Structure formats: structure tokens, C-alpha cells
Amino acid sequence: KMELGSGLLVGDDDWYDGLAFDGLRADWAHDNVDLTMFWYKLNEGFGMAGYGKILGALTGGGMSGIADEDDGNFWGVYSDWKFHDKLGFDAYLFYMLCNHMGPTNWESWTPGVRFYSEESFGSGWNFDLELAYQNNTWQDSATDSDGDPTDLGGTGWMFDGRVSYTFNHDYEPTLQFGFTYITGDDDLVDGDDPDTDLDGFWRMFGESHNRWGNADMLYSSALGNYNYDYTS
């Protein structure tokens, strides 16, 4: 199992059946800096149940013809800097290449940053802010009538923010407010080339139920969500 940062994009998904990866991971720590590098084999043969929904979620359609002899790989670098006692800053880059998802190869780049506080900062305030950008390309071997590749590509981004206040009381009551926004594509024929432009953000392997509740079962890339809770 692996959880990076707040688990927004890579987590162990413990609300459901849990999520584990097979591959290699290396960790390095020095003073206030932690660095994680990894390579994971998502599947040997890309017959992964449910992953055909990824492209279908962005395009509004489904996928078929997933070949068992093809596979998916996931690489990443995640760094965490601690400073000013209980403040932290993370920066990361994820890359995924899945060969022959249906008729195409899927390539995805996701850089992101996170700024957060640990436990109480100042007079009971805590925060966790994260922003990620994504570039997706589905590399098709087919060509159009002009002989040009019919690759499908697009970009998207995600913002997740949480602010909480813990009151000075024996029971430590805490009030938290959160907001998540994920971009999509409300017009599938916009852009410079209506045949190849498709914007959206794939939510990867994150822990989403604690943020969106049952909305995490929706495979739509566009999402806006407010939430608040009180604990004691």
C-alpha cells in the first residue's frame, strides 16, 4: 500500500477493499526533506476490470478490445519539504503509460503541488491546499483521410482545499470546510481540432470517499464539491 501526501491522487483507498501496488519504491530522507520515487506495474496484460471506464468517462462512451498481452506502468517522484515548524510543501510528478487500451495507447502526465499545516498552526487553524495539472494523450495507430494520426488529447486540472479550526477545549471540537473542483469538457467538439481535442482530469488512485461521499462512484471528470463537518 502507498499513500502520498493527503492521498488525493495516490492512496490506499481503505474505505472500500483497499488498494495496493506491485513494483519498486525508493525513499530518501535528509533533515526536513523526504523524497519518494517509484515504478509500479499496474497490470501485466491490461485486462483490468473497470479501467475501460476511464476513457469512457471522459468521452461519454465505452471501450472494448482490451488486449491481455499489453500492460500498464506507473512512475512517479514525490517530494516533501518541512519548514517553519509545522508547515509543509510538496511537489510531485506522475507519469503513466498504458499500452493498447482498446485501440490506443494512453499516456498521462500529472504534475502538482501541495501546501499544508500539521496539527495546530497558530491558534487552532489548519489547512491543506493542493493543485494538480494533467495532460492526457490517447495515441491511435489509425490515420484520417489526410494521413495524419487521429490521436486524442486534452488537459485538465484539480484543486482540493481544506481549512479547519480546533477550539481550545478538552474535547478538541473541530470545524472543517472543504472544497474540490475538477475540470472537464462541456463541449466535446471545441478546441483547435474538433477531432482530437478532449479536456478532462482523471482522478487516478486517490482516496475520494472521505472528500465526496457517494459522488466518488461517478466516473465523470468534471466535479465541484463543497463539504463541511464537525468532530469532537
Image: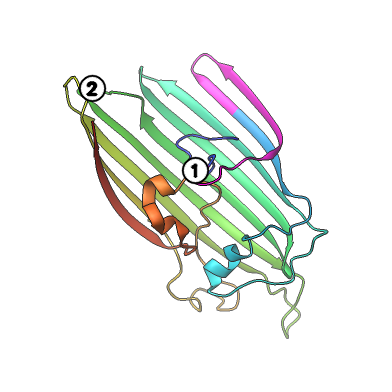
The residue that disc 1 covers is 112
Magenta stretch holds residue 42: no
Q: Position of residue 62 (x, y in %)?
A: 61, 73
Q: Residue at x 48, y 58 (%)?
A: 156
Question: Nearer the N terminus, badge 2 or badge 1?
Answer: 1
Q: Nearer the viewer, residue 200 or 53?
A: 53
Q: Residue at x 56, y 42 (%)?
A: 18
Looking at the rendered structure, the kind of residue marked 2 is: Gly
Q: Position of residue 132 (x, y in %)?
A: 47, 47
220 in relation to 143, above or below = above
Q: Residue furthest front?
A: 17
The residue that disc 2 covers is 122
Left or right of residue 103: residue 112: left
Quadrant containing the C terminus in the rendered view: top left
Q: Secondary structure at mark 2?
A: loop
Magenta region, residue range = 13-35
